Amino acid sequence: MAHDVLHDCPVCHKPLHITKLHCPACGTSIEGDFQAERLLALTPEQRSFVLSFLRNRGNIREMEKELGISYPTVRARLDQILAALGLESNPSKEKPARKEVLEMLAQGEITQEQALDMLKKP
């Protein structure tokens, strides 16, 4: 039975290193120090969110419907995932650009009420 890859040591909670790869078909084993895929470092909940995001082709309104959460919650979770992957360039606390809010509104990704709330943010 296959298990999810662990990223942190269950004893000391420090990052684990992948040191052995094995092919079950031919029995070949390779030892070394291997880099883990960054997406594997996400929590199961974050990976599920990413799959939902891809399934909905990045449409935040569809994400809201599927997950039953608000626009700000979708954005917050996305920001957390970006940060976990080391891809966060703008902290989520910053006010989104007016143009960005209007584009999301025009594309139907957010409601008028959500757009007004985002534009009122300090």
Image (cartoon, grey):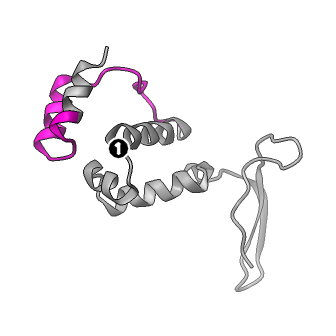
Callout 1 secondary element:
loop
Q: Residues within 10 Å of mark 1 (few under 14, many from 20)?
A: some
Range drawn in magenta: 86-113
* Quadrant where the C terminus is found in the figure: top left
Give residue 22's position: percent from left, percent from top: 75, 72
- Residue 121, placed above or below residue 41: above
Asked whether 33 or 87 is in front, the reply is: 87
Residue 50, quarter of picture: bottom left
Residue at 29% x, 58% y: name it: 57
Q: In this rendering, would 62 be left or right of 30?
A: left
Asked if the stretch drawn in magenta spans residue 3, the answer is no
Residue, x 74% and y 56% (percent of image)?
6
Residue 120 percent coordinates (x, y): 24, 19
Residue most toward the right? 11
The amino acid type found where label 1 is placed reads Ser
Could you tell me which residue is drawn at 70 percent across and 60 percent down?
5
| Residue 91 lies in the magenta-colored region | yes
Residue 35, percent across and down? Answer: 66, 50
Q: Residue at x 43, y 37 (%)?
A: 76
Query: Extreme top residue here?
Result: 122
56 or 84: nearer the viewer: 56
In this picture, residue 55 sits left or right of residue 25: left
- Provide the major secondary structure of the magenta segment: loop
Position in image of residue 66 (x %, y %): 35, 60
**Quadrant occupied by the N terminus:** bottom right
Look at mark 1 in the image and give the residue it sits on: 70
Relative to 5, does residue 13 appear above or below in the rendering? above
Question: Residue 113's image quarter?
Answer: top left
